[in-house]
Image (tube, coloured by chain):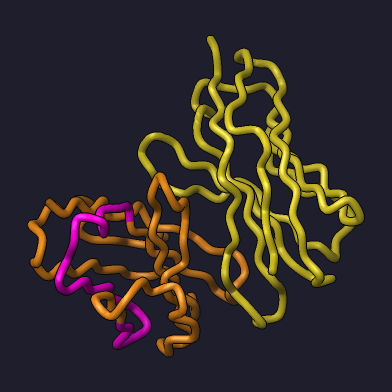
Chain colours: A orange, B yellow
Amino acid sequence: DAGVIQSPRHEVTEMGQEVTLRCKPISGHDYLFWYRQTMMRGLELLIYFNNNVPIDDSGMPEDRFSAKMPNASFSTLKIQPSEPRDSAVYFCASSPRGDTQYFGPGTRLTVL
Amino acid sequence: AQTVTQSQPEMSVQEAETVTLSCTYDTSESDYYLFWYKQPPSRQMILVIRQEAYKQQNATENRFSVNFQKAAKSFSLKISDSQLGDAAMYFCAYTGYGGATNKLIFGTGTLLAVQP
C-alpha cells in the first residue's frame, strides 16, 4: 500500500515567487496534517484537516501561507510570495482517526 | 499546555548493544497517545512505536520497546541489538485522545550514533 506522497521532493525558488507543495494522503485516512521543520524551531504544525475541512490553522505563520484540501486524496500548501525565511522541510502526514500520524517524505524548500 | 522533553541531545551505542533514550512529558489529560519517530539522514519521519496511555502494558516492536511510567510521565525507548541502520534522530511525541486536539507535540530530538 502506498504511503503519503509529496511533490516536489525539492524546490528551489527565488524570493517573491509563488510556491505550491502537494500531498496525497493514504487512502482511507480522514485526517491530513502539514508540518514545517527547521533547525531553529523544530517541527511545527501548520494546519490540519478532518474530512477535507480545515480544523486548526493557528500554526500558519501569516497570510502568505494558505492550504486547501479540495478532496480526500489531495491537498496543497501554497506560499505567496515566498521569502528566504520560509526555507525549511515541509511534511505532510495523514491519519485514519487523528491519533497515529504517518508522514510523507517531505519537500525541502529553498528560497533564495 | 502539553510539553515533551528529551534531555539527551546526543547518544552513542556500540553495534549489537542496547541503548535507552529518555522522554518526559507534561499533561493534565488522562488519556493520550505517545510515539517515537525515527528520522534518518533521508529526513523521512518513520513511526517506530506507539503507546496508548490507558494500556498498562509496554508496547514492543521487534527490537524496540518502551518503558511507560504514567505516574512519572516518563516514556523511554529501548533499542536492543543496535544496528548501523538505527543511527538517526529520534523524536518523542504526544497527542491527546478523543479528537479534542490532534496536534502532535514533539520533543527536540535525540541524535543516536551507532559505532561499528
Image quadrant holding the N terminus of chain A, namely: bottom left
Considering only vertical position in the picture, is A41 above or below A47?
above
Task: Choose between A28 and B115: the one closer to the eye.
Answer: B115
Count numbered badges in the picture: 0
Considering only vertical position in the picture, is B56 above or below B114?
below
Residue for point 56% across, 50% down = B47
| Residue A104 image point, x, y percent | 38, 57
Quadrant assignment, res A107: bottom left
| Residue A2 image point, x, y percent | 38, 60
| Residue A9 image point, x, y percent | 23, 52
Residue for point 19% across, 51% down = A110
Considering only vertical position in the picture, is B12 above or below A77?
above
Residue for point 58% across, 36% down = B110
Residue for point 69% across, 65% down = B2
Is residue A84 on the magenta stretch?
yes
| Residue B63 image point, x, y percent | 68, 33
Q: Is residue B24 visible?
A: yes
Left or right for A9, reference A89: left
Left or right for B29, reference B40: right
Q: Is residue A2 visible?
A: no
Quadrant assignment, res B28: bottom right
Range of the magenta residues?
A68-89
